[in-house]
Amino acid sequence: MKNACLKKKTPNPLQQEVHDTLNPFEEFKTFQFRKTEIPLDQIVQSTEVIMDQIRLGYERLLEEEAKELVWMVQYNTIIKAYEVAEKYIKEIDYSAEDIEDFCFALESPQKIPYLIPGPAGIYISALCNYAKEEEIVLKLSELKTEINLIGFRLPKGKRLMVEGDTGDFTGIGLEGGELVVEGNTKNWTGAGMRGGKILVKKNIGLHTGEWMMGGEIYVGGRVRGLGNIVEGKVYERDKLVYPGKARYPNLYY
């Protein structure tokens, strides 16, 4: 008579080993990940809105301060224009990239009808001074027009780097920030600056540091001439030229 009781089956060690080495993530095969699409159209639209606001602020500055497209650079005019720029800029939520885009658009008549070096520089300086970022890079090397007044009133804690050349009045009224110009600057660089540092890697023009109250100016190339400096230091190729023999305005070449 056959034994009705079945013998307990002994597990095969080889089968057990195979079972243990199965992919532990196998059960997740049927899990469906939810796809999140990046709304690129919304991002582009938002960027265009910000650029429109920035351009509108610049155009309003021109309307108020340069109605006849003739802009005399006088300190009281600069102060007034800067205050107008501040008023419009404070209403815009922008980034350092938006400032760069605005600089690229400056020589596009389809985007910005008028490029005037003075108001443009004041407006860009105000954008940089009120930007959230502590370090800002301006790529001006592709612009045919040299912009004046870049770095006006750059505050302490800000570092502004300029790729390319700048025009007159670069870094005037600097208030403690650091301004680096990869190329050349023209006349009146650092005029009236109160503190901070200006580094011009190539050459610098006449009246450098005119009525400068403090801070330091470093020039990698040649200084064409110093202004009437009150306080501060000016270096030419690591050599201190003010204070020193070059105390009064002079020409180096």
Image: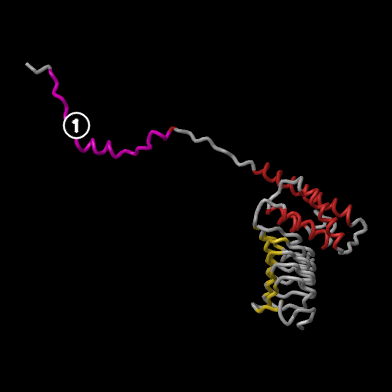
Q: Read off the magenta span.
A: 5-29
Q: Is residue 161 left or right of residue 71?
A: left
- Local crowd size for mark 1, using a 10 Å CA cut-off: few (<14), some (14–19), many (≥20): few
Q: Nearer the viewer, residue 8 or 244?
A: 244
Q: Is residue 135 above or below residue 251?
A: above
Which picture quadrant has residue 104?
bottom right
Q: Is residue 59 above or below residue 161?
A: above
Q: Nearer the viewer, residue 243 or 41?
A: 243
Residue drawn at the location 86% of the way across and 55% of the way down: 62
Q: Amino acid at mark 1?
A: Pro
Task: Check the picture and name the quadrant holding the N terminus.
Answer: top left
Q: Is residue 31 left or right of residue 111?
A: left
Residue drawn at the location 70% of the way across and 52% of the way down: 131
Residue drawn at the location 54% of the way across and 37% of the way down: 35
Q: Which residue is mark 1?
A: 11
Which picture quadrant has residue 226?
bottom right
Q: Is residue 27 left or right of residue 21?
A: right
